[in-house]
Amino acid sequence: MAGLRRRISLSGGTALAVGMVVGSGIFGLPGLALQLSSPQVAALGWLACTIACFPLLCIFAILGTRYASAAGISRYAEVALGPRAEYAVTAVLCGTFPLTVPAQSLIGASYALIAFGLKHEALLPVAESFLLVAVLFNLGGIRTAALINTTALVLIVATVLALGAMHPSDLLRGMRLWARPDWSSVTFTQLWKVSALIFWAFLGWENVSFCLEEVKDPQRTIKRIYISSYIVVIVLYFLLAATMNGASVGDPSVNVTEGIANLVSPRWRIMFSLMTVAVILATANAWVFSASRLFYAAGRNGLLPEVFARLDPKGSPRNAVFLVAACFAVVLAAATFLHLSASDLVLLSNQNFLILYLVCICCSWKIGHGLSRWLLTPVALLACGFLLAGFNYQVLYPIALLALGSACWRSRDARQIAHMAGNDPPPG
């Protein structure tokens, strides 16, 4: 079977990684975090997630350099914990990815309503349009996807710098919340709740693992992709979060999903909302890219039917992209029927990815040595423990997916044993 081609460079990989992380997070979460808490707590939540994310990113960089595969995290689990773990992790991923892009599409649709002056009733059709466009981008092949994410990165940087330049007093006021925090108004429960939500903005680096099979010169390039994208993301988040938190001190109108639009003067608000829509579309495009590689790898290893492991003449897993599109459509319809908000989907996705991070930490412990084992792994475990501290019965969802994946592996193993027994020659 033909494999994926190595066509991702350092610059393209960095743009793809940044595109997977920022987007709906950078434009939606500053306002959502302020809905849940005060500007001071929100500021500390951004700082907590930045610190918690770094050891996890280092683990992804180390594992990705050593085991570059379209199977991504599933491959790490297989190497460290065996094929049963690979199936279990793949099942969790297949049950988590379909939650992510619908959440992004709902956030993007909120900005689209502002840009086009639409009523709230148009939210679902606009969100569906987001999904359709992201899928069409991916059907265009990897070059189209890379171009879109590079363009989006330029738009993000320009937007964040422009907002900071237009609101220097808000930016400085927000920076003071980190420099001289008022701890008297902060409780652990508040800090955890806002951090658990903000962590959505830091999801994405684990998804880079599904693209690493296509990276040129992986031994040199992969770690550089992770580090360079981390620096870009942190600078962008801190600039924007400081501006939003500073503005919220005197103007609570920014404390909504599309709150950043309220920092822009009315005559520029439509243009800003259009730029935001374009950026979130690019993020959705990057996540569809990762999800399609996951489903492609699942078809290749037998968890999904083999038809999803086939490549089109461009070398893209077209059938896997179609499966991704179908899953997204089902989740968006279910979310509408069950009255689930973008925040609900965000928190559920965050929880599932944190469970997967625990698996990656375990893999790092099993195959690591030196500092990566004795320092990096415990620190990453503490970070995950903090972010998982407040989840309750919802944790049953990823546990059920882990059990389902394990059951699929047992079933496949039993079929293989039966097949081998049937092919054994009769005793003479």
Image (spheres, rainbow, N blue to C red):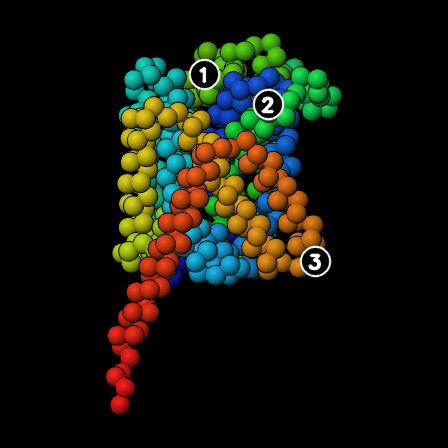
Mark 1 vs mark 3: in front: 3
- x, y percentage for residue 199? 54, 33
Q: Amino acid at mark 2?
A: Gln
Q: Residues within 10 Å of mark 1 (few under 14, many from 20)?
A: some
Q: Residues within 10 Å of mark 3 (few under 14, many from 20)?
A: few
Task: Tell me how far mark 1 sits from mark 2, CA to CA.
Answer: 32 Å
Q: Who's the residue at 63% across and 58% down the image?
A: 368
Q: Amino acid at mark 3?
A: Gly
Task: Tell me how far mark 3 sits from mark 2, CA to CA.
Answer: 36 Å
Q: Which residue is mark 1?
A: 269
Q: Earlier in the sequence, mark 1 or mark 2?
A: 2
Task: Tell me how far mark 1 sits from mark 3, CA to CA.
Answer: 52 Å
Q: Which residue is mark 3?
A: 370
Q: Please, is residue 25 above or below residue 67 in the view?
A: above
Tell me where residue 340 sits by quadrant. top left
Residues at circles 1 and 2 in contact by the CB criterion of under 8 Å? no
Q: Earlier in the sequence, mark 1 or mark 3?
A: 1
Q: Who's the residue at 52% across and 50% down the image?
A: 359
Where does the C terminus fall, quadrant-wise? bottom left
User: Element under label 3?
Assistant: loop
Question: For this rendering, which residue is in front, 43 or 263?
Answer: 43
Q: Earlier in the sequence, mark 3 or mark 2?
A: 2
User: Element under label 2?
Assistant: helix
Query: Is residue 264 found left or right of 374 in the rendered image?
Result: left
